[in-house]
Amino acid sequence: ENSNPRRYLSDSRLNDLQADLISIIRKKGSNNATRLIICCTADGNKAWKLSELKLPKDDNLAVAIHEYQPYNFTHQNFSWAGLSGQTTTLAAQGGFSYATSWDFGQITSFMKRTGIPVVLNEFGLNLVKASPEDVQTYISGITSFCEENNIPWAYWQYCDNGYSREGAMSLYRKNSYFGSRAWDKTALDAMFD
């Protein structure tokens, strides 16, 4: 992932920068001529930006995507996301399929249209505020979609820094705020069921 741009970089500027970077890497020769380069979309690697992504012809590219829909569910109660004190459920957000189907459609359409693979290198949710049933539904839904479409995936271990009380996305909570050190069994079971 060569960048994780937010709103500050336009689609066209990002496309130009990535084309330049790919050219620079390929010209270095040796294993750089065929090295896998993971590119990104604008606005924080959102799936809805895949339609704006223009990459040079190259057989060794992939695109990193982050999936956090429905945002009010995955980021509930996080002050840094502007949702402090707000909680919700998957059902209140329209359910898992409703919330993710558009992004999933964008991903599969992009892969079919371009032949470029996608890597879902970030997804996660507030494991403390979501019910165990919603954690199971959300995580198993994401990982099942990925595995059915041959998309590598990675859970985002956000804020596991030993002092933040908002490390609620952490699969392993080592912060005393959460009690004893432990793995989130519900989340792990959903990932590797």
Image (cartoon, rainbow, N blue to C red):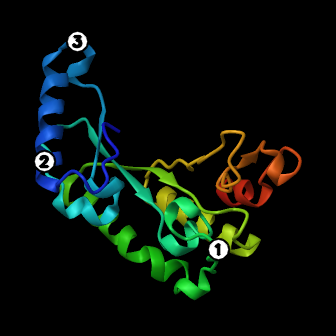
- Compared across the picture, whether 98 is left or right of 60 comes to right
The amino acid marked with disc number 1 is Gly
- Compared across the picture, whether 56 is left or right of 118 comes to left
Residue 100, position in %: x, y?
A: 45, 73
The image quadrant of residue 130 is bottom right
Q: Residue at x 18, y 14 (%)?
A: 29
Tell me whether the residue at label 3 lies in contact with that at label 2, contact meaning CB atoms closer than 8 angstroms: no
Question: What's the distance in space between the residues labelled 3 and 2, CA to CA?
Answer: 28 Å
Find disc 2 in the rendering and name its residue: 13
Q: Earlier in the sequence, mark 2 or mark 1?
A: 2
Q: From the viewer's side, name the closer residue of 108 and 127.
A: 127
Q: Earlier in the sequence, mark 3 or mark 1?
A: 3
Q: Residue at x 53, y 59 (%)?
A: 80
- Compared across the picture, whether 162 is left or right of 92 comes to right
Q: Residue at x 17, y 54 (%)?
A: 10
Residue 41, position in %: x, y?
A: 27, 53
Circle 3 or circle 2, nearest the eye: 2
- Disc 2 on helix, strand or loop? helix
Question: What's the distance in space between the residues labelled 2 and 1, CA to CA?
Answer: 37 Å
Q: From the viewer's side, name the closer residue of 105 and 67.
A: 67
The amino acid marked with disc number 3 is Ser
Find disc 1 in the rendering and name its residue: 85
Question: What's the distance in space between the residues labelled 3 and 1, CA to CA?
Answer: 53 Å
- Disc 1 on helix, strand or loop? loop
Circle 3 or circle 1, nearest the eye: 1
Find disc 3 in the rendering and name its residue: 30
Circle 3 crowding by C-alpha within 10 Å: few under 14, some 14–19, many from 20: few
Res 114 seen here: yes
The amino acid marked with disc number 2 is Arg
